[in-house]
Amino acid sequence: MQKKSTIILGIDPGTVAMGYGMIKITGSVFTIVDMGTLRPGKVDDPYKKLQLIYNTVSGLIIKYKPDVFAIEAPFFGKNVQSMLKLGRAQGVAIAAAMRHGLDVTEYSPKKIKQSITGNGNASKEQVLKMLQRLLNFTDMPQSLDASDALAVAVCHHFQENTLLPASGKKVNGWDDFLTKNPGRLKK
């Protein structure tokens, strides 16, 4: 019997550079399907940039038929204009995914880094090194935007497929947990 595969498309949105990364998971085996960077920053018309982002995300979805779409949430900085542009880029990428019937999940940059490296304040280079270990590749991506998008896809897989088995017991705090799981306390 063949194991079912899942393809996850991850997006690191941006109007200057948008990273995309796609992984395929079969059982516990991760495979990189595609990874790259779109550079809409070379286009002068801001609306043409958004159209290029929409068309690129749509094209990736049509070509690879991912099961899931995950995107990095905007990082809230002090520059309002940058936030507006980033929000628009994220919005058109989400619209493309929804147009093709994909559910959308959004993760904060800190959550992605935490999921991949165990440190929510990890650098982009640290995230890349961990991805190289997890996915067994040595090639450097064309940009860190591409590896960031790959991290979004891997983060989604980790968030949806926890390694800890569900006990089915709801708990309210440590005291409640220890009461319901006395064998877990080491003395």
Image (spheres, grey):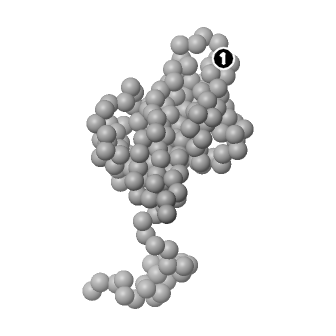
The local crowd at label 1, few if under 14, some if 14 to 19, many if 20 or more residues have their Cα within 10 Å, is: few
Q: How many marks?
A: 1
Q: Most extreme residue toward the top, as rendered?
A: 44
Image-based side of 77 in relation to 62, left or right: left
Quadrant showing the C terminus:
bottom left
Counting from the top left corner in percent of width and height, residue 180 is at: 47, 87
Q: Most extreme residue toward the front, as rendered?
A: 1
Instruction: Identify the residue shown where x is 46% and y is 29%.
Output: 36
Counting from the top left corner in percent of width and height, residue 101 is at: 70, 44
Image-based side of 42 in relation to 147, left or right: right
Residue 122 appears in the picture as rendered: no
Counting from the top left corner in percent of width and height, residue 120 is at: 40, 49
In this view, 122 is above or below 143: below
In this view, 109 is above or below 37: below
Instruction: Identify the residue shown where x is 39% and y is 27%.
Output: 143
Image-based side of 145 in relation to 160, left or right: left
Residue 160 appears in the picture as rendered: yes
Q: What residue is shown with label 1?
A: 48
Q: Secondary structure at mark 1?
A: helix
Please tell me which residue lies in front, 60 or 85: 60
Amino acid residing under circle 1: Lys
In this view, 15 is above or below 30: above
The quadrant in which residue 85 appears is top right
Instruction: Identify the residue shown where x is 53% and y is 51%.
Output: 6
The quadrant in which residue 127 appears is top left
Please tell me which residue lies in front, 169 or 53: 53
Counting from the top left corner in percent of width and height, residue 54 is at: 65, 28
